[in-house]
Image (tube, rainbow, N blue to C red):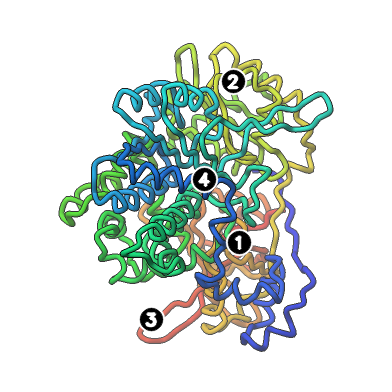
Amino acid sequence: MHKEQWLLLNKKTDLQEVAADYDLDPMMVQILANRGVTKEELPSFLYGKEEDLYDPHLLKDVEKAAKILADAIRAEQRIRIIGDYDVDGICSTYILYVLLQELMQGAERVDYYLPDRDLDGYGLNERIVRQAAEDGVEVILTCDNGISAMEEITLAKELGMQVVLTDHHDVPYETDATGEKREMIPPADAVVNPKQRECNYPLEGICGAVVAWKLMIVLYERMSAGDAENAKDAENVEKAVLRRMLPYAALATVCDVMELKDENRTLVRLGLGDMRDELTMLAPEHIGFGALIKAAGVEPAKITATTLGFVLGPCFNASGRMENAMMAMDLLCTKNAGEAQIKAQKLVQLNDERKALTEEGIRDALRVWEEQPEACGEKVFVIHLPEVKDSIAGIIAGKVREATNHPVFILTGTGETVKGSGRSMETYSMYDEMCKVKDLFIKFGGHPQAAGLSLHNADIGAMRKRLNANCTLTEEDFTEKIKIDVNVGFPYFTPERVQALACLEPFGNGNPSPRIADSGVVFASAKRIGKMGNMLSFTLEKEGRRIRAVYFGDADAFLEQFEKKFSKEDAKDLLCGKGTRKLSYLYQPQVHTFRGEESIEVIIKRIKWE
């Protein structure tokens, strides 16, 4: 267990004067202030509308990209979309494919390819480019990839193809003798990526699907304006494209862990609203997604960002991790409800298999690390698990990072070359650090907190040594900062106050669910729950009130820590309903309804042991 430091946020706010206008509780005002919301931003934060979304024309090269595609459509040229095998890449590809097909009136002149993890690796490669040329493709359209494909796009140009690049990953760069960074942008005919230095889009942290979706809005406007008989008002065209593809832009935003602030928050709110609308989801383009929602046992009216990130998104990802992401595209493109249900059930099954393999991989990773004497004291963990599927390396890396609060690379494979995925924390930019040792890698790319790579097996030791030699993290950096929004006891909550918290949704990166702490709470009783007895239900007591609490963490680990903090006798008393010891914890209040009566219960998210 790594060190933790609990910090109570108490940011100053100018929201009080407008709080009354929105009937906000003082606790809500403080939570909003902790999120950095100003009084000017409050209306869009709480009630963001389509009008609050940014103008797609602000994206660099988006007009140029739309013109290339419009010209290709009118000239009846063949377009191939090259996506990626994760949720963002799948959604990006689907948005582009559906909308281009419509503009081309269903012609087979537009198709798509999602790279196979084992055969292709990430993004464009020489085989994919040459295959496109052999198939008579005249325009390659990338989505959620391409910004690092300098050689591949150069080859595509040499083979006579036009390339429209849409991506959102960090732009590769070289550093000159003065320390100045020079962007290394591939020679595509148009490069639409908000991370480019010269791009004026107000929010650079949008996902690949949103970039693709914005391009389609501009393209539809251009095509409509050029059609004298059926010209539409540009604003109406934009809204039509916006509403139909919004669920996929929202899904990708959450699953690619974009910050749920600003435009991202608004489009996810709107997208979730569409997903909950049964009439909307009956449209032909949503049959496959609707089937997955049903197969995963999700009630449409209760879909949240958490549902997207932890239930539905992983099913899409499982296709690329366990078999091939083309399965997910096949589901989305299916127009027959019966066929869609069968395909959706297969994705749910694959995800269940992925979960089992992941749990085994996490245990192996922690064991291997503990058994590596040369790794003692190292700050960056580089762990080689030869037999693990490289498709789940990123998930394992993320879980090990959560457990240790260290940057983690998980490498897989037994041949001359190995693949890997890394996950980091706020204080360590994984992508920047990899750039410092880029001579080691065959290929790499990613974000500050996540990356993918391949390298020669013989260079694993050098990678570990050089990354650690360059690392400037201190012990303080490895102490996880638990930021608490408010410190308030459960007696404060009424059903109305709990329900009011819902207006802060969607929750996710950049807008976590409120972290509410309570201290001096008596843990009066505990009992094991769940099929395996691996979870706990408590009775808590404070200010003369008792309440039920549920803890979904490891029951054995909790009881072990309870004994260490207090005694074996205290642990025995707790299980016998005679507990007197007090703890501090983070919790989430919720409304429990039984026989028409509402009461408050809490879910315990974290215990403070130190």
Q: Which residue is mark 3?
A: 594
Quadrant of the rendering where the N terminus is positioned? top right
Helix, strand or loop for disc 1: loop
Q: Which residue is mark 2?
A: 441
Q: Residue at x 52, y 72 (%)?
A: 49
The disc, 1 or 3, on the residue closer to the chain's N-terminal end is: 1
Q: Nearer the viewer, residue 559 or 257?
A: 257
Quadrant of the rendered structure where residue 473 is?
top right
Q: Nearer the viewer, residue 584 or 566?
A: 584
The disc, 4 or 1, on the residue closer to the chain's N-terminal end is: 4
Residue 3 x/y as whole percent: 71, 46
**Label 2 crowd (10 A; few <14 / some 14-19 / many >=20):** some
Give amino acid for label 2.
Phe
**Label 3 crowd (10 A; few <14 / some 14-19 / many >=20):** few
For discs 4 and 1, the disc positioned in front in the rendered view: 4
Q: Which residue is mark 1?
A: 261
Distance from label 2 to label 1 (Cα)?
A: 34 Å
Give amino acid for label 3.
Phe
Distance from label 4 to label 2 (Cα)?
A: 33 Å
Q: Which mark is residue 207?
A: none
Q: Which mark is residue 64?
A: 4
**Label 4 crowd (10 A; few <14 / some 14-19 / many >=20):** some
